[in-house]
Image (cartoon, grey):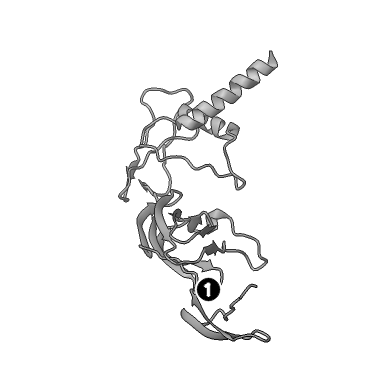
Amino acid sequence: MAIITELPKDAEEGVRELLWELPIKNGPRYAIHLRARHEIPQLTLPISEVDFGTVVVGQRSKRYLRLINDKHVPVEWSFRVPTTKFGVPLPPWEVPFGITPTFGMLEPGQDSIVEVSFTPNAAGAFAEKLALRIKDNRQSAVIALRGSGSALEVNITPTSFCHLGPVLPYQQDPPCRQELTLENPTDHPIEIYSVEFDSAYVTEEEMLREYDGYDEHSIAEMPLREVGSSSWPRLVESVEKARAKSARAAQ
């Protein structure tokens, strides 16, 4: 014999009791005391607010949060990825805040770590509340996220154009020159190079075109580089291996 208790989702938590008299034909009556504890699945967030501070546009900052299930019932949660009006998920460059993974389940007493990220796509302040939907619970667990995007920029003087003046063909002395003043008004170091004449830039662009580590959105996440440092070791190693494999196959 199975005894099942059912309550509506909006019922309050607590203990439910019932004194059930079990009649027996041609026999005594037995009183059975039934007790059930009603619990609503819920996530506990030790930290419900995250401030990413200032992040350069195009870079990504990550934080890690703990989700705890201190209830006596399993908790199944999910995050709805932002979509267009047609239900298509927005590309990552249009979504400044994200969470990984986007769903999970915790048994009673379990906890797990999730990653929340901030990738500003423009300069300015960003704020959003990420709602983690919980099965069999009308209330979501909410994480408040905020951060600021800072764009790299350089002030150039003169701002319009450089007038070099007339010069004879193949004339070298005196040389025709015009000085430019570059100013970094930001709080971040900036590396400046010429896309036409910098051989390191040209080499790196070739490797980026050959790199096969991009995701389905043609995005590859790399660690930040110090200004003036060489290319990413992961990129160089991957491309060199691919080139060596192609060379062996061509022999």
Who's the residue at 53% across and 63% down the image? 77
Residue 80's spot in the image, x, y percent? 57, 64
Q: Residues within 10 Å of mark 1 (few under 14, many from 20)?
A: some
- Residue 29 sits in which quadrant? bottom right
Q: Quadrant of residue 207?
A: top right
Residue identifier under label 1:
137
Q: How many marks?
A: 1
180 lies left or right of 35:
left
Residue 239 percent location from the top left of the image: 56, 27
The quadrant of the rendering that contains the C terminus is top right
Q: Residue 164, image x and y in percent? A: 41, 37
In this rendering, the answer to whether 168 lies above or below 70 is above
**Would you say residue 139 is visible in this rendering?**
yes
Q: Residue type at mark 1?
A: Asn
Q: Residue at x 40, y 56 (%)?
A: 65
Instruction: Quarter of the image for the N terminus: give it.
Output: bottom right
Q: Is residue 150 among what the camera can see?
A: no
Residue at the spot 36% in from the left edge and 25% down from the top edge: 174
The quarter of the picture where residue 110 lies is bottom left
Depth check, front residue: 156 or 131: 131
Please identify the residue farthest to the front as the structure is shown: 26
- Give SS at disc 1: loop
Q: Position of residue 67 (x, y in %)?
A: 43, 59
Residue found 59% across the figure and 19% down from its top: 244
Decide which of 140, 41 is in the foreground and name it.
41
* Position of 132 relative to 159 (above/below): below
